[in-house]
Image (cartoon, rainbow, N blue to C red):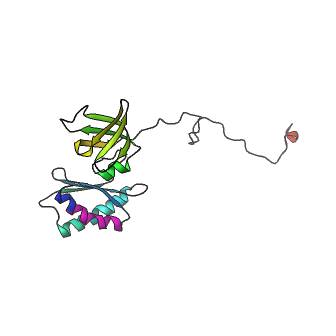
Amino acid sequence: MSATTDRVFTVVEPVAARLGLRVYDVDQPGGTLRVMLDADGGVDIDTLADASREISAALDASEPVAGSYTLEVSSPGLERPLRRPEHFAAAVGERVKVKLMPGTEGDRRADGTLSSADGDTVTISTEEGERTVAIADISRATTVFEWSPPPKPGRGGGSGRSGARPAPVPTTESSEDNR
């Protein structure tokens, strides 16, 4: 993180904690100040709206960013950016896409399962084998959400529209009385 994003994190973290949220990341690409919040089970739009108002007020009061900027408060999403060592550590076991800095030895892209991460390196299990790279050599990395196909009709889709016949309604008459 830069000095500015460190100052923003210091202001935003207590606000997020008070709302039951965690600060996933703070980034400042250009004139946008991006604050990503997370919680167990995810974050809904109403929570993000409340957090945005409170974070905006806290930033206005402490002014940790010089000049004007656009505040963007969001969740990290299903395909989360991985920028800090703790992001990589939390994503061990997940599918990832990694792009490496120019000049890095080997292929600049590594797609696979993140098999390990320490403070300095990550290991990705790819189709070609395991590849260990320095976090400092990564220019961009994200988790990959794997969409599963919808269930086939009649195969436990649970919607009630699968074409299965409804269960018979029990009656009080015996079958012998209805002949």
**Which one is in front, 105 or 168?**
105
Q: Left of 131 or right of it: where is 159? A: right
Residue 76 appears in the picture as rendered: no
* 156 in magenta: no
**Which of 67 and 91 lies nearest the eye of the viewer?**
91
- Residue 133 appears in which quarter of the rendering? top left
Q: In which quarter of the image is the C terminus?
A: top right
Q: Where is residue 20 in the image (x, y as percent from the top left)?
A: 38, 64
16 in the magenta segment: yes
Query: Where residue 18 sits: x, y (%)?
Result: 35, 68
The residue located at (53%, 36%) in the rendering is 151
In the rendered image, is residue 124 in sight? yes
Q: How many marks?
A: 0
Location of the N terminus by quadrant is: bottom left
Range covered by the magenta-colored residues: 7-18
Point out the residue furthest to the left here. 67
In-front residue for pair 128/4: 128
Q: Residue sitting at 27 percent across and 34 percent down?
A: 109
- Name the residue at 36% across, 29% down: 128
Residue 38 location, x and y as percent? 36, 56
Expressed as whole percent of the image width and height from the top left, the position of residue 90 reads 37, 51
In the image, farthest residue toward the bottom: 61
Q: Quadrant of residue 112?
A: top left
What predominant SS class does the magenta segment belong to?
helix
Left or right: 142, with 41 as reference point: left
